[in-house]
Image: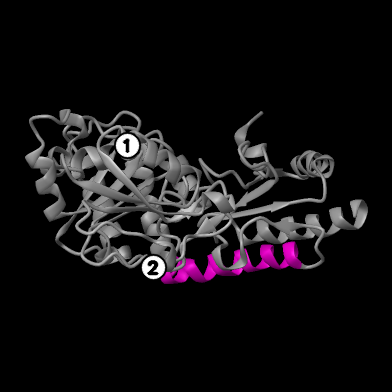
Amino acid sequence: MNSTSTPRVFNFSAGPAALPLPVLEQVQRDLVALPNVGMSILEISHRSSAFESILAQAEADMRALAGIPSNYRVLFLQGGASLQFSMVPMNLLSPGATADYLDSGSWAAKAIDEARKVGSVNVAGSTKSDKYVRIPAQADLTLTAGAAYVHMTANNTIEGTEWKDLPQVGDVPLVSDTSSDMFSRPLDVGRHALIYAGAQKNMGPAGLTVVIVRDDLLERSRARASVLPTMLNYAVHADNQSLYNTPPVVAVYVLGLVMKWLTTQGGLAGIEKANRRKAAKLYAEIDRTGFYRGTALADSRSMMNVTFRLPSEELEAKFVKESAAAGFDGLKGHRAVGGMRASIYNAFPEAGVDALVSFMSEFERRAG
């Protein structure tokens, strides 16, 4: 079937996620030959001046959007956030030092497991005993004086929770995994020492990882150059402008287009308004009668990943089947927690939220 005759479904997947339609259309227009280049982005050399321009513009637009200070480097890497679970401690956790980790969900727990393979880890706060239905409160935290860094997971994709305010960590460097809420709202880069995110939720396609790292943290990488694998050393990538090896060329190109699209949406403040509006509509339907039950506590609810249950697993199976038939993809919750999950990242259209709310209301009328 010709792609132009295939209707687009509403993609509620937790990632890879929906991309802005104007971005997809531009990729389609320019796929065979980039303007003024005569080659596809799939073919272009990463050493060419054309790609260096694409890379530089993507970084410049990202810096402008997020207000990234000049003493931070932007790295375009590979391996996903999962590789960062290892790279962060390998680069920043010196022998004899301790890193603090905030355990707010399944991915935070995975980061802790990887860091423990590298050095000493203190779990400075955890809501595991509450089944991760909330974010740790400041009063819950027991931080290590002089820690190498404090690691947090900004948004918990599986459990549907999100930090509303950054934890207070004093002068200790704050490291944040922002994979599932990166650029969904304004970001105070200056309060962080290092930020990392897989691109496939809010910034582009799978295969690209963005790291924003403060200059002074790179000195730790340089000090460990003799023991770090070259490809796992932040300083190597910073010193080579993310071109030490072949970067994910296509993903960088698409990310650059997404940065321009975000600018047209009013920047991060504008996209936050749209995201809050979408999430509010969906949570209002969940809370309307009690037929649906949100799984995260109200003050910890995520704007990006809306998790909820139905009265029985049988009804949940019916909901998944009927919603798929109605053109809603990816609503089944993560296998670790079950239930439903609607991921409504930046590019997810508000019309899709409206359509899901209508479907939920009708499903409740028939099955409730």
Residue 32: image quadrant is: top left
| 79, above or below 310, in the image | above
Whether residue 277 is in magenta: the answer is: yes
- Residue 83 in view of the camera: no
Determine whether label 1 and label 2 are within 8 Å by CB.
no
Q: Which residue is mark 1?
A: 116
Magenta residues (range): 265-287
Of 275 and 131, the residue lying toward us: 131
Q: Left or right: 310 with respect to 90?
A: right
146 with respect to 330 (left or right): left
Q: How many marks?
A: 2
Residue 335 against residue 280 in the figure, above or below: above
- Quadrant of the rendering where the N terminus is positioned: top right
Q: Position of residue 341 (x, y in %)?
A: 64, 48
Residue at (38% x, 66% y) in the render: 166
Q: Is residue 57 above or below residue 51?
A: below
- Would you name the residue on which mark 2 appears? 186
Q: Nearer the viewer, residue 50 or 106?
A: 106
**Is 169 positioned to the left or the right of 272 in the image?**
left
> Is any part of residue 207 visible from this angle?
yes
Q: Is residue 342 left or right of residue 125?
A: right
Magenta-drawn stretch, dominant element (helix, strand or loop): helix
Q: Nearer the viewer, residue 349 or 223?
A: 223
Q: Amino acid at mark 2?
A: Pro
Residue 361 at what x, y percent from top left?
82, 60
Note whether 183 is above or below 103 in the view shown. Answer: below
Specify the quadrant of the image occupied by residue 357.
bottom right
